[in-house]
Amino acid sequence: MRVFLVGFMAAGKSRIGRRLARSLGWTFLDLDLDIAGFEGQPVADLIVARGESHFRERETAALERCAALERAVIATGGGAFTLERNRRLIGDLGSSVWLDPPWEALCRRARQSRHRRPLFTSPDRARALYESRLDSYRQADVRIRTRGTERKRDVAAEVIRRLGLASRS
């Protein structure tokens, strides 16, 4: 079983994913960090240097490598689930969970983040990108609406409950 956390940048996929994996006693994989390790450079640098389409190819390859993982929580990049081939692959490998905080929380987190986000160049452009991705996110198996202020353990517990999984804690 694999759980893929999907949603827009700064939705909390990595933070909640770590907590969820710990609660389940499973492996955690941050797909962006996996790609950075394979490519030898941070994702933001890869996107700037090689372009978003190259990054998306690397992202699909990283998703394919997830087939080797058993009992894993995978935090995807914000655009991974927008590609049909990736949605199909994720569906074949496990369950998708859309973490859906309000736009205001996403924007605040992205601005406060220490991570460079080349696709968040301005709030207006980011909002347009967010809205263009909503139809893809809506195709996730489970949608977890948050306020963006909940504790990680509470959101992780909700994911566990909604997927009918057994927590070890």
Image (tube, rainbow, N blue to C red):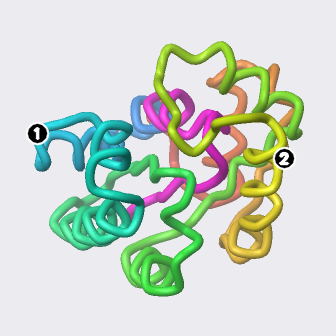
Amino acid found under the numbered disc labelled 2: Arg
Closer to us: mark 1 or mark 2? 1
The residue labelled by disc 1 is 40
Amino acid found under the numbered disc labelled 1: Gly
The verdict on residue 30 being magenta is no
Left or right of 27 in this view: 141: right
Name the mark on residue 117. Answer: none
Q: Position of residue 131 (x, y in %)?
A: 82, 60
Magenta region, residue range: 1-19
Left or right of 35 in this view: 14: right
The residue labelled by disc 2 is 145
Q: Residue at x 65, y 53 (%)?
A: 7
Nearest the eye: 147 or 124:
124
Judge whether residue 83 can be spotted in this image: yes
Nearest the eye: 80 or 129:
129
What is the secondary structure assignment of the residue under circle 2? strand
Q: CA distance from mark 1 to mark 2?
A: 35 Å
Residue count near mark 2 (Cα–Cα under 10 Å), binned few <14, some 14–19, many ≥20: few
The verdict on residue 10 being magenta is yes
Of the 4 image quadrants, the one containing the N terminus is bottom left
What is the secondary structure assignment of the residue under circle 1? loop
Q: Position of residue 152 (x, y in %)?
A: 64, 24
Q: Residue at x 63, y 38 (%)?
A: 120
